[in-house]
Amino acid sequence: MANQIEEPSADLDLRFSKNKPYSEDVVTQRSLILGEMIGLTSDQLAKIQEDRFTLFKIDEEKVEALLRILEKIGFTNPTKLIEDFPNIMGSKIDSVRGKIDNLKDLGFANPVKLIEILPSILSYNVESVRDKINNLRDLGFANPVKLIEGFPSIIGSKTESVRDKINNLRNLGFANPVKLIEGQPTILGYNIESIKEKVANLRNLGFANPVKLIEGQFSILSFNIESIKEKVANLRNLGFANPVKLIERQPSILSFKIDSIKEKVDNFEDLGFTNPVRLIERQPAILNLNIDSIKSKMDNLEDLGFENPVKLIEEQPNILNLNIDTVRDKINNLRDLGFENPVKLIVEQPNILGYNIDSIKVKMDNLKDLGFANLIKLIERQPSILSYSIDSVRRRVRKVGLLLHHEYDNSIDIFEEERFLFSTKPLKMNIIWRIIQDNEDLGIKNPVEKKRLYVKYLKNNLEDVLFEYIYNNKGNGVSKEEKIEKIIDEWKILKNKKHDREWKILYDYMRGYHKESL
C-alpha cells in the first residue's frame, strides 16, 4: 500500500524534514513539481536530496501560494529567488518578513532588492549582519550599509580579508583605498595579484600613473591588456599624437569602439571643423556627446549672434558642455555690466564663458582700485586681462614703474597704451631693461626715448633681442632654435665670469627659460 501524503496545514510552511517518511517515488514526484513550477535544475534537486532533506508537505497549490506571497512582499522574480536560494522553501514566510524588517532597521533602504542580489543573506543572523556593519565602520568606511548594498557579497567576507585588501591596495600606491572601495565596491572581488599585474602592464604601455588611471576608470581592471594595447595603436592610426595621454585625460575612451571614435572624427569634419583630432585632444569629453546635440548647439550659438560657431568651439571646446541658456545668461550679464557687444568680447576671449559673472565684477573692482580708469574700454581692447590674477597685474605695473622710474599712475597709463604688457613676464621685463641700461652704444638718456625703446624691445621675441645684444647683429636668416643654441653656448663661455654685465643678463635668461642647462 502506497504511503499516504498528509494534507497541508493552513499556515504556509515548506520546511524540510531530515526524517524520511516517504518513499523514493513520492520524493521524485515532489521533485518534479519543483522542477516544473519553479525551474530548479537537476543539480539543485540532487543537492537537496544529497543534504538528506526530504520534501515535506509540498504540492502545486502550496508552491503557487509561496510564489504569490513572495511577489506580494515585493520580490520582482520569486521563481528566480527560489532557484538561487532553494532553502527559502525551508523558511516560514513570517521569518522572511522578519528578516526584511530587521534589515530595514539596520538602515538598508531596499532589503528586498538586497535579498534578490544576495539571497543567502536570509541565512545570516541579524546580529552577524550588525557586527559586519560595525567592523566595516571600524575599518574606516563612513557608510557600511551603502557599501554592502553596492557589494552584498562582502557580508560573507571575513573582516581580516577586507583589512588585508585595504593594506594591499595602499601598498600598490592607492592613496585612499577605503574611499576607492566606497566608490567602487566591486574591487573587493578582484584578486590583489591581478590588480598588481594590471598596474605593471599599464606602466609598460606608457601610462605614467596607472594607479590614478584605475582610480578614474575602475572598469579598466576588467579590460584585457591586449585590448588596451590595440586601442592605443588604433587611436595612433587615427592621428592622435599621444593616445596614452588622451586615455589618461579621458579613461572612458577605453570603453568606446574604435569605429565609433572614427565616425565622430568624420562627423566633426562634415560640420566644418578643420582638425577634429586636435579638438578631441583638447577636450576628450566631447566624445561622449551625441553629434546631433553638437549640431543643435551650433545652431543655437548662431541664433545668439555668433557668426562662426565652429571657430568659437575650436577656441573653447568646453562650450559644448555648457547649456545654451548659460551662454545666453552670460551675454545678458555682460551687457548689464556695460559691455556694448558681449558676443564680440566672447569671440575674442572665449574663456570668458567659463568665468563666473561675480568674479568678473570683482576683477573690475580690483582693477579700478589699482587706478585703471575706463575698465570697459580696457577689457574690450584687452579681454585676456580677465584671465590674470589681480596680484599678477599689480606686480607687472609696479615692475614697469620701478624700471622706468615712473610714478605708479604713469605706469597705469603705459599699460593702458601697451596692452601686451599684461601678459609679459616680469623676468623678461628685467632682462630687456638691463640690456638697454648696459648697452652704452644706444646712448639714450632721454626718459621718454628710453620708455619708447623699452616698449619696442618688449614687443620683440626675447631671443632676437638677446642675439642682437650678444653678437651685435639681428641674425637675419638664423632660426629661433639656432639663436637659443648660440645664446646657451655664450652662457657656457661666460659661466665663470659672475661679475660680467653680460653674465648677469644671460643668467636671468637661463634661470627663467633654460634652467636645465644651468
Image (cartoon, grey):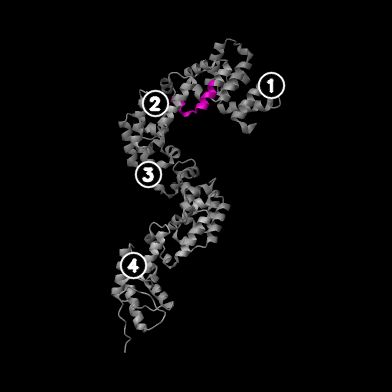
| Residue where numbered disc 3 is placed | 263
Whichever of labels 3 and 2 marks the residue nearer the N terminus, that label is 3
- Dividing the image into 4 quarters, which one contains the C terminus? top right
Whichever of labels 3 and 1 marks the residue nearer the N terminus, that label is 3
Q: Nearer the viewer, mark 1 or mark 2?
A: 2
Graded by Cα atoms within 10 Å as few (under 14), some (14 to 19) or many (20 or more), the crowding at tag 4 reads many
Graded by Cα atoms within 10 Å as few (under 14), some (14 to 19) or many (20 or more), the crowding at tag 3 reads few
Q: Residue 51 lies in what quarter of the image? A: bottom left
How far apart marks 3 and 4 lie (CA) works out to 44 Å
Whichever of labels 3 and 4 marks the residue nearer the N terminus, that label is 4
Q: Is residue 157 magenta?
A: no
Q: In front: 198, or 419? A: 419
Q: In front: 229, or 377? A: 377
Q: Residue 53 lies in what quarter of the image? A: bottom left
Query: What's under tag 3, amino acid-wise?
Result: Glu
Q: Secondary structure at mark 2?
A: helix
| Residue where numbered disc 2 is placed | 345
| Residue where numbered disc 1 is placed | 500
How far apart marks 3 and 1 lie (CA) works out to 61 Å
Res. 291 mark: none
Question: Which residues are the magenta region?
Answer: 383-397
Residue 183 in percent (x, y) is at 46, 51
Please indicate whether residue 275 sits to the left or right of residue 452 in the image: left
| Residue where numbered disc 4 is placed | 79
Q: Secondary structure at mark 1?
A: loop
Query: What's under tag 2, amino acid-wise?
Result: Leu
Whichever of labels 1 and 2 marks the residue nearer the N terminus, that label is 2
Q: Nearer the viewer, mark 3 or mark 2?
A: 2
Q: Residue furthest top?
A: 446
Query: What's under tag 1, amino acid-wise?
Result: Asp
